[in-house]
Image (cartoon, rainbow, N blue to C red):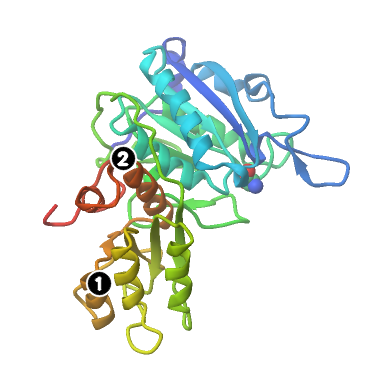
Amino acid sequence: MEGGGHDDARVARASVMKVLVLLTGGTLLMSANVDGHYTLEQTFARNLVAEVPALARIAELDAKLVFALDSANMRPREWQVLAREVHAGVASGKYDGIVIVHGTDTMAYSASALALMLGPLPCPVVFTGAQRPLAEARSDAAQNLVDAAIVATLPVPEVVVAFGSRGLRGCRATKRDAWDYDAFDSPNEAPLVKLGIGVERGGHVRAPGVLAPLDDRLEPSVLAVRVFPGLDPRLVTGAVRAGVKGLVLEAYGVGTLPCHEGSLIPAIEEVTALGAPVVVVSQCLRGHVDFTRYEGALLTAKAGAISGGDMTVEAALAKLMIGLGRYGAGDELRAYFARSVVGERTPEASA
Ligand code: ASP
């Protein structure tokens, strides 16, 4: 980690930094209604700077309301709209970084999808949100917003999830806690930024890239299936026969699946032959798929499954949708999965 970046130095530079804030909804922007449940009705258009004056000391902010959604209602269609907004903001050259206020429930999916859709970035694109609304006295919202704004002004040209005093690589992040303020983790990647008393930036932050024309094609008809003892393989083949174009199988450990009674191997062969690729990731939070270790994993690879390596399920789903949209189901998709596009996986040795 490289140290430095203390707040006071940042305050002195504030006048020259400019950040675009895209609001999409989520708990941060909600408030409790008369029944006591959180709603976006009254408060989605909050003036963030009026409520968190410290933001103005970090950068000059432009804000735009893109959606007012609980993130449970975000779909691939909304990712595409958001990707266009971000792309336009970055391409304008007006901003040092972009902050996206988003619900926590699907933030890791959106961050993965945007990272993969946008590709190399010249500046940070920082997702944040909160476990409790900004409108409440005891809330993590203000701190997360301030941290996100700071990360947006740092040389961290990646899609980042800024939450709980850390900036995580967005395509490696996962929501791990529905209750604590420290809601996110990136189990297979060290934080890009630590925001403690100092602000430390990891040595593995990607180098700045040149923004490419936006390719927002994707195929949303995919399915993730968590393998469990007794899973009926006919449900897997049935899903593909019903129109599913690709599958992410959350296998055990390093990628094993049942291969004796109730074997999933014929189902993988069948759906692959039907033109629906099967990507295997691990149910475990840490570690990676290794098809060479056990019989069940070896057979899975032989049946035609694609290794998802150490990708999160969120990243694997987004990559499958985007890969299918761009390349279809052939060898190009396999090669796309084997490589690391924006740091979402450790690349396969041969890729
Ligand atoms: N349900 C909310 C959302 O994802 C939860 C949150 O923001 O923390 O929009």
- The quadrant of the rendered image in which ligand 1 is seen is top right
Q: Is disc 1 placed on a helix, strand or loop?
A: loop
- Camera-side residue: 265 or 14? 265
Residue 269 percent across, percent down from the top left: 29, 71
Query: Does label 1 point to a residue whose CB lies under 8 Å from ligand 1?
Result: no
Question: Which quadrant is the N terminus positioned in?
Answer: top left
Q: Amino acid at mark 2?
A: Arg
Q: Residue at x 40, y 67 (%)?
A: 250
In the image, residue 209 sits, relative to residue 2, either above or below, namely above
Q: Residue at x 32, y 45 (%)?
A: 323
Q: Which residue is mark 1?
A: 303
Residue 9 visible, this orientation: no
Q: Residue at x 35, y 27 (%)?
A: 214
Residue 280 percent across, percent down from the top left: 33, 64
Residue 232 percent across, percent down from the top left: 47, 79
Q: Amino acid at mark 1?
A: Ala
Q: Is residue 62 left or right of residue 219?
A: right
Q: Earlier in the sequence, mark 2 or mark 1?
A: 1
Q: Disc 2, disc 1: CB below 8 Å?
A: no
- Camera-side residue: 179 or 321? 321
Q: Is disc 2 placed on a helix, strand or loop?
A: helix
In the image, residue 22 sits, relative to residue 268, either above or below, namely above
Residue 165 percent across, percent down from the top left: 49, 42
Q: Which residue is mark 2?
A: 326
Density class for disc 2 (Cα within 10 Å; few <14, some 14-19, many ≥20) is some
Residue 10 visible, this orientation: yes
Q: Which residue, as the protein is rendered here, is positioned at the far right?
A: 34
Q: Is residue 80 left or right of residue 300?
A: right
Quadrant assignment, res 31: top right
3D distance between C-alphas at marks 2 and 1: 24 Å
Q: Residue at x 45, y 76 (%)?
A: 234
